[in-house]
Image (cartoon, rainbow, N blue to C red):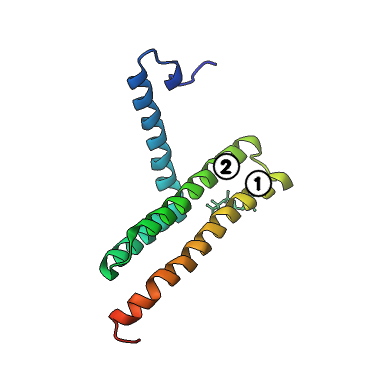
């Protein structure tokens, strides 16, 4: 199709193809950062949670996994929003279902991350503040 950028998988030089794939994926991260306020907020909250884990001596591993889960779902939600806008620029009930359900995936992951965060951080935080 005319106008398509070079396809990484069709590059005869494997390393060049892989690097091009990474570059496209990074463009996707940049796009989400620019257009999605929620994505930026989730990155800031993730960094805050990591800092808190280090300060409280909690293992950063579950925190990193939860950050990856929430950010990955937000990226998929952003992709689905763009695709929905392409397919259905005007109101359609199925477009609404698609967008609302993709957003629900982020909500479920974010609430789970919040609950796990409370479970991990609350006891050492209260101890650190001398409240337990
Ligand atoms: N083409 C459409 N047809 C029907 N409903 C739509 C359409 N586009 C958006 N909506 C409705 O508006 C809501 C917000 O859509 P929008 O594209 O503005 O997402 P957003 O506010 O950027 O979402 P998020 O908070 O996940 O970034 C959707 O969840 C959906 O309910």
Q: What percent of the width, then of the height, locates residue 11?
A: 40, 15
Residue shown at the point (62%, 40%) measured from the top left: 84
Question: Dot 2: what SS?
Answer: helix
Residue shown at the point (39%, 75%) measured from the top left: 122
Residue shown at the point (45%, 16%) measured from the top left: 10
* Vertical arrangement, residue 132 with respect to residue 49, above or below: below
User: According to the image, label 2 marks what residue?
Assistant: 80
Total numbered labels: 2
- Residue 40 sits in which quadrant? bottom left
User: According to the image, label 1 marks what residue?
Assistant: 98
Q: What percent of the width, then of the height, locates residue 96?
A: 67, 49
In the image: residue 81, left or right of residue 4: right
Pick the front one: 107 or 126 = 126
Question: Dot 1: what SS?
Answer: helix
- In the current view of this chain or complex, which residue is farthest to the left? 55
* Quarter of the rendering occupied by the C terminus: bottom left
Q: Are marks 1 and 2 in contact (CB under 8 Å)?
A: yes
- Residue 37 sits in which quadrant? bottom left
* Vertical arrangement, residue 128 with respect to residue 30, above or below: below
* Vertical arrangement, residue 7 with respect to residue 61, above or below: above
* Quarter of the rendering occupied by the N terminus: top right
- Residue 15 sits in which quadrant? top left
Q: What percent of the width, then of the height, locates residue 115?
A: 49, 68
* Vertical arrangement, residue 123 with respect to residue 48, above or below: below
């Amino acid at each position: 199709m005319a106008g398509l950028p070079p396809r990484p998988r069709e590059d005869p030089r494997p390393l060049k193809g892989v690097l091009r794939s990474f570059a496209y994926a990074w463009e996707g991260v940049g796009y989400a950062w620019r257009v999605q306020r929620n994505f930026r907020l989730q990155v800031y909250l993730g960094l805050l949670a990591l800092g808190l884990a280090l300060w409280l001596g909690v293992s950063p591993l579950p925190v990193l996994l939860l950050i990856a889960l929430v950010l990955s779902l937000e990226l998929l939600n952003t992709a689905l929003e763009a695709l929905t806008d392409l397919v259905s620029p005007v109101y359609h009930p199925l477009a609404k279902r698609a967008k609302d359900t993709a957003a629900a995936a982020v909500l479920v992951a974010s609430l789970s991350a919040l609950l796990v965060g409370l479970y991990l951080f609350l006891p050492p935080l209260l101890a650190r503040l001398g409240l337990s």
